[in-house]
Each structure stands twice: as structure tokens, then as C-alpha cells.
Amino acid sequence: MKIYYDQDADLSYLENQTICILGYGSQGHAHALNLRDSGLKVIVGLRKGGASYEKAKADGFEPLEPAEACAQADVIMMLVPDQVQPEIYEKAVKPNLTAGKMLMFAHGFNIHFGQIVPPADVDVTMVAPKGPGHLVRREYERGAGVPCLIAVEQDATGKAFKRALAYAKGIGGARAGVLETTFREETETDLFGEQCVLCGGVTALIKAGFETLVEAGYQPEIAYFECLHELKLIVDLIYEGGLSYMRYSISDTAEYGDLTRGPRIITEDVKKEMKRVLEEIQSGRFAREWILENQANRPVLNALRRREAEHQIEEVGAKLRAMMPWLKK
Ligand SMILES: NC(=O)C1=CN([C@@H]2O[C@H](COP(=O)(O)OP(=O)(O)OC[C@H]3O[C@@H](n4cnc5c(N)ncnc54)[C@H](OP(=O)(O)O)[C@@H]3O)[C@@H](O)[C@H]2O)C=CC1
Ligand SMILES: CC[C@](O)(C(C)=O)C(=O)O
């Protein structure tokens, strides 16, 4: 696979173009600020009265109504939540999506699952950072970057890939590496990663470890530090140098326990369940469930959020983190 870096990308594909960032949340603020700091012309499309409107103003933007911003733009990046994108597309984007413009996404959900169907005479591309938006900004500011995936769904101008690669460079992604993919591959792997490993898998593992220790009579504070707090420190080592570097740093006792007990925790049964989750993603069953959940006003998400907030690990964690002034409140 070819991986693209700064030297492969040419910002001039976006020079003299106006880039509209729709949404100023996790990804939106990071893309807008990074692109502007990279010397590109950025405008922000936002509804008035929302929390992020004031934040964008405080960062020096003059937010426009989404439809007005789309009318002025050559490039439109969709950075409102996936579940609201189809409505914003119909109301603000579609009427202003004239030939030769580029419609962009940071996640392929709505294109891959057919919730947004752009006209044939525009470029449709994706630059998907493989990291949370706040880190896309933080890494850029310290001269680094978050790796990105890039994909072209429609190439009306013949320059779609180069334009998208310039965008990836503008947000700092090409410092870390830009990997070519398809909307389908990004959507399916992203959903799988967040459900089975990065968010769903990790939080379930943390809670299971915490509950096991507390139910066995150990102090919740000890269980918190062991199963949650230290995880970040261990993952930092894995991030910096892979599994082997983490194993080099931990004690031989820990390494022996890791290698002999780890596979008893993540068993073949767990992998079988991962395959079932992947199949639900590939078949569109998860997408249908999520779309219907939103149409029904999110009863399941709201109930689960409430239940999770009441978990003992959250209460203990809040108390312990309050004693660490270097953590953001
Ligand atoms: N979060 C992440 O780190 C990642 C996200 N992505 C993708 O990036 C895209 C954006 O996600 P993310 O940054 O999490 O989004 P956020 O939830 O952070 O987006 C919030 C922004 O969207 C606006 N918004 C929310 N609802 C509406 C609405 N109904 N009408 C108009 N504006 C609205 C908010 O405005 P207001 O303040 O007015 O509510 C705010 O500016 C998604 O496609 C996501 O899959 C990809 C990789 C990682
Ligand atoms: C892991 C969650 C994520 O996929 C991400 C930050 O990359 C998301 O969609 O937020």
C-alpha cells in the first residue's frame, strides 16, 4: 500500500478555493483551525444559538448560516454528527452543490449506506482522521499529526484525489501518513473498531476488571487505578513503540502474566462475537438500527447513557481525578 506524506501532497490544489466547514464540534473546530493555520481560506457554517457558534466566533471565525456558507464555498466538509447530515444535506448543501464543487466527509456512513446521494457532477471525497478531533488539533499545534484515511467516491473534476490529499495535508494528517481506502472499507472498519476495540471493547474490559476486583472486596480506588488510570500509561507505550516496547518496559512478571493469561480473557468466543458484530455492520443491520434509533428520539441511547453515568467507576474516577490538577476539568 502506498502511504502519502507531506511531500506527496500539494496545497495549491486548494489555494484560491473557499473551504466551508459545516459544524464546529470535535472534528469541525480542529479542521477549521488547522486549515486556516495552513494558510487556506476557511469559512464555518453553523446554526445561530448553538453552543459552538460562540466558540467559532471566539476563535476568530464569522460563522454563516449553513446554506449561505455552502453557496460561497468550493469545498464543503460535512462535520456535523452523522445522524443529522442527511437533513442538513437536503436543506443547506444540495441546493448549493453546483458542478465542480467538492463534497467531503470525515466518515463514510451516509454515502456508503445511501443516506446522502450527491449529483454526478461534483467530487465526493473523504478525509477521515484516525483519532478524536481534539487530538487532531492538539497534534497539529505541536507539529505532529493524526493519520488519515482518504477515499474518492466521485471524481467529476479529474482532480478529486489531489484536492482531498491537499485537504489532508492542511489538517496535518500527511505529517503522520494518509492511507488510500474506499468509503465502504472506512465505514465498516471504523464502525468495527469503535464497537469492538476502541470504545465498546475497551470500556467493557475496564468495567469487567473493575467490577471483578470490587466484588472480591478490594477498594474501588485501587481497582480504578489498576483497571482504568494505568491503562492510559500502558497504551501510551504501545502507541510509541508497539506491543514489544510496552513489554520491554513492564516487569518480566507482568509480561509472563500478559502472555499466559491474556488469551484466556480474549478467547475464541470473543472473536466469534466480534465476527457477528462485523456481519451486522456489513449487512447494514447496525446502520438501520442507528437510523431508526435517531428517528425514535434515541430511547436506547438515552437510557444507556443514564445507566453508564451511574456506574461506580465514574463516581470513584471523578473523585480521584479532582486531585489531579493537570487533567482538564
Ligand atoms: N468525533 C471524532 O473525533 C470523529 C468524528 N468523525 C466524523 O466526523 C463527523 C463529525 O463528527 P463530530 O466532530 O463528532 O461531530 P460533533 O458532534 O462534535 O458535531 C457538533 C457540531 O455539529 C453541530 N450540530 C449538531 N447538531 C446539529 C443540527 N441538528 N443542526 C446543525 N448543526 C448541528 C453542532 O452545532 P451546535 O453547537 O449548534 O449544536 C456542532 O457545531 C462525523 O461524520 C463523524 O463520524 C470522524 C473521525 C473521528
Ligand atoms: C473511535 C471513535 C471514532 O471512530 C474516532 C475518534 O475515530 C469516532 O467516530 O469518534
Image (cartoon, rainbow, N blue to C red):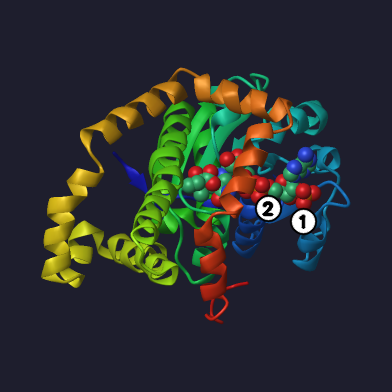
From the Cβ of disc 1, is ligand 1 less than 8 Å away? yes
Determine the residue positioned at 52% across, 67% down: 316
The three-letter amino acid code for the residue at tag 2 is Gly
Q: Is residue 101 left or right of residue 288?
A: right
Label at residue 25:
2
Determine the residue positioned at 42% across, 47% down: 204
From the Cβ of disc 2, is ligand 1 less than 8 Å away? yes
Residue ID for mark 1: 52
Q: Is residue 144 left or right of residue 41?
A: left
Callout 2 touching callout 1 (CB < 8 Å): yes
Work out whether mark 2 precedes mark 1 in sequence or the reverse, and give the earlier one. 2
Q: Is residue 110 left or right of residue 241?
A: right
Q: Position of residue 52 (x, y in %)?
A: 77, 56
Quadrant for residue 78, please give it.
top right
Q: Can you say whether 122 is above or below 202 in the image?
A: above
Q: Position of residue 71 (x, y in %)?
A: 81, 37
